[in-house]
Image: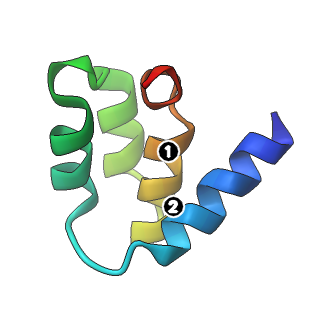
Amino acid sequence: MLARADWAWRVAAHVRSGDPMDIADIALGPALRPQTRTAMHHAGSRQDALALLFSSPEFQRR
């Protein structure tokens, strides 16, 4: 689990442009859970929001 979170954080650091919510909507569309959207909205930084997206259950299923 820790390795997955570390991977998500490192990948998020390489995403240089785009709003995290737009990226989530494009990547997951209706599969994006309200819980993930809320967590991303409350994230402390853009990188945190992307890391939450990349480590979310719905993203991991893709």
- Mark sitting earlier along the chain (2/1): 2
Q: Does the CB distance between marks 2 and 1 fall below 8 Å?
A: no
26 shown above or below 50 = above
Dot 2 falls on a residue whose secondary structure is: helix
Give x and y (percent) for residue 30. 16, 20
Residue 40 coordinates in the image, percent (x, y)? 37, 47
Above or below: residue 60 compared with residue 55: above
Q: Which mark is residue 48?
A: 2
- Choose mark 2 or mark 1, whichever is in front: 1
Which image quarter is the N terminus in? Answer: top right
Residue 20 locus on image (x, y percent): 28, 58
Q: Is residue 45 visible?
A: no
For the C terminus, the quadrant is top left
Left or right, 38 with respect to 2, comes to left
Disc 1 is placed on an element classified as helix
Q: Amino acid at mark 2?
A: Asp
State the CA–CA distance, disc 2 to disc 1: 10 Å
Q: Residue at x 49, y 76 (%)?
A: 14
Is residue 23 shown to the viewer in this render?
yes
Count the numbered circles shown.
Answer: 2
Q: Is residue 18 left or right of residue 43?
A: left
Q: Dot 1 surroundings within 10 Å: few (below 14), some, or many (20 or more)?
A: many
Quadrant in the rendering for residue 36: top left
- Give the side of residue 37 with respect to residue 12, left or right: left
Residue at (16%, 43%) from the top-left corner? 26
Q: Residue furthest right?
A: 2
Q: Is residue 8 left or right of residue 56?
A: right
Residue 24 in the image: x percent, y percent? 26, 44
- For image coordinates 69% across by 54% down, the residue present is 7
Q: Which residue is mark 1?
A: 54
Q: Measured along the vertical axis of the image, is residue 2 above or below residue 13?
A: above
